[in-house]
Image (cartoon, grey):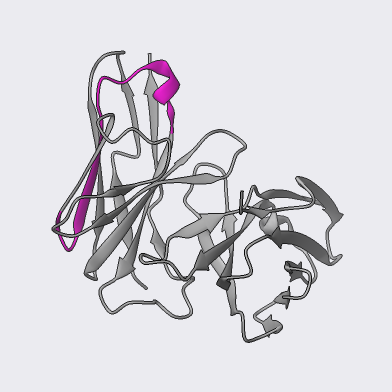
Amino acid sequence: GAVVSQHPSWVICKSGTSVKIECRSLDFQATTMFWYRQFPKKSLMLMATSNEGSKATYEQGVEKDKFLINHASLTLSTLTVTSAHPEDSSFYICSARTASGRATNTGELFFGEGSRLTVL
Amino acid sequence: GESVGLHLPTLSVQEGDNSIINCAYSNSASDYFIWYKQESGKGPQFIIDIRSNMDKRQGQRVTVLLNKTVKHLSLQIAATQPGDSAVYFCAETRKTSYDKVIFGPGTSLSVIP
């Protein structure tokens, strides 16, 4: 099946630094990637939708200057948390949709294994 | 606002029993629903899906029921096993310009051996 890889799987950084998280579709082309954020014992909250070659669409309340998203190719999207602070500590999960459109029998999306960010 | 929600935040069941996890949604425009399983520290794993033109769909040990009249769906797990212990999310997609997938709050299922 289709695989989505996230890197790093976990990262610890100092407050004020920036952290980049990569999301790669390994065996398919993803025209659309989604970035989610998940706090402990909470659900996945959609942050933004990333379309290859265009600006990301952010959900209400998500600061686009804080969470920079780039989708430069059909297999790679990156999320950069700029000037990270302890409240940005969270589990960030990306998902990808195939270029062919709806991915039947897979729940629409292929998910990465997540990246846990801890800001000291 | 419109959202997908769950009735029970936690559920404990005896091994071998059947589990039922419920989910309510508020937007009648939602046309596709998915159940995901998430184990600790991992990304969501697809379980089963159902489209709004169906009211029941069965998989291996799992069944999803959709009641559009009351905007409710459920996930039934037969003969629950310890490996089923996880958090379960229902999710929906709506007919918007970019079909984002919105997750419900989740139910933690604990299987008692």
Task: Work out whether A103 lies above or below A16.
Answer: below
Rendered location of residue A107, percent (x, y)? 49, 70
The residue depicted at 34 percent of the width and 70 percent of the height is A2
Report how many numbered discs are placed on residues in the image.
Answer: 0
Q: Quadrant of residue A29?
A: bottom left
Image spot of residue A113 (x, y percent): 41, 50
Residue at image coords 22%, 51%: A77
In the picture, measured across the screen, residue A2 lies left or right of residue B82, that is left
Let me know if residue B95 is in the magenta part. Answer: no
As drawn, A61 above or below A48 = above
Quick one: A13 or A68, which is closer to the camera? A68
Residue B26 x/y as whole percent: 67, 60
Residue in the picture at 43% in, 35% down: A61
Question: Quarter of the image holding residue B4?
Answer: bottom right
Horizontal side, residue A19 vs residue B59: left or right:
left
Comparing B12 with A62, the one in front is A62
User: In this view, which residue lies farthest toward the bottom?
Assistant: B53
Q: Which residues are magenta?
A: A72-90
Q: Identify the image quadrant of residue A91.
A: top left
For residue A92, above or below residue A65: below
Instruction: Tell me, yes or no, whether the highlighted magenta stretch contains residue A82.
Output: yes
Q: Where B58 falls versus B85 (above or below)?
A: below
Q: Is residue A120 left or right of residue B78?
A: left
Residue A81 or residue A62, whichever sits in front: A62
Expressed as whole percent of the image width and height from the top left, the position of residue B45 reads 51, 61
Q: Residue at x 19, y 55 (%)?
A: A76
